Image: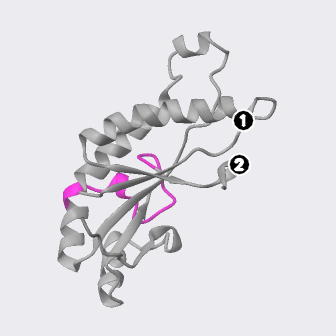
Amino acid sequence: MHRSMKIAFSTVACPDWTLERVMSFADEVEYQGVELRTFGWGGTDLACEPALTDPKKVRRLAIESGTHVMSLGTSLRFDAPVWPPVIGRALPGHDSNLQSARRFVALANDIECPHLRVFGFDATTGEKRGRTVARVIERLQELLTAASKHRVSLVFENGGTFSR
């Protein structure tokens, strides 16, 4: 299937804009898409925080402006070591980042957004890089299972020590 490229911008560049302003601007300058940056349900850094807006409203604003919500940009990272080693997996909250990630997948699905941006981020100091990579992959595989049920693709940003 041929997919055409869409010109888009991220709301990280306009943190003081409301969603109405974001969609209006996208329409005005003929952008086809937007990445909605999110800090999640407790986030107050963005006036256009999609996690604090009814998903139906986000979809309606996008449809009315003819703008596609191309990606939900998160700060999710999957590099944190299990602590304490081995028994840390049995402790409450050890997978809180994955729980947040699943909520973001559901949000992306609810606003009909096809992509969720995440990070691997940093190899842990004192640990072999391969171990960190294996941990990131293990967690991403778990998230991929949830994402595939919602037809949301993960976009892995090359940041931190995973810059190449």
Residue drawn at point x = 60 percent, y = 55 percent:
158
Q: Locate residue 87 relative to residue 146 in the image: left or right.
A: right
State the quadrant of the N terminus: bottom left
Quick check: marks 1 and 2 in contact, CB under 8 Å?
yes
Spot occupied by residue 82 in the image (x, y as percentages of width and height): 62, 22
- The local crowd at label 1, few if under 14, some if 14 to 19, many if 20 or more residues have their Cα within 10 Å, is some
In front of the other: 14 or 155: 155
Q: Is residue 124 magenta?
A: no
Disc 1 marks a residue whose amino acid type is: Arg
Spot occupied by residue 45 in the image (x, y as percentages of width and height): 52, 59
- Color theme of the render: one colour
- The local crowd at label 2, few if under 14, some if 14 to 19, many if 20 or more residues have their Cα within 10 Å, is few
Q: Main secondary structure of the magenta part?
A: loop
Residue drawn at point x = 56 percent, y = 35 percent:
136
Circle 2 — which element? helix
In front of the other: 34 or 38: 34
Labels 1, 2: front one: 1
Q: How many marks?
A: 2
Spot occupied by residue 8 in the image (x, y as percentages of width and height): 40, 76
In front of the other: 163 or 160: 163
Circle 1 — which element? helix
Residue drawn at point x = 38 percent, y = 38 percent:
144
Disc 2 marks a residue whose amino acid type is: Thr
Vertical placement of residue 38 versus 144, above or below: below
Q: Earlier in the sequence, mark 1 or mark 2?
A: 1
* Disc number for residue 161: 2
Q: Which residues are magenta?
A: 40-56
Residue drawn at point x = 30 percent, y = 57 percent:
114
Q: Locate residue 81 relative to residue 150 in the image: left or right.
A: right
Q: Which residue is mark 1?
A: 129
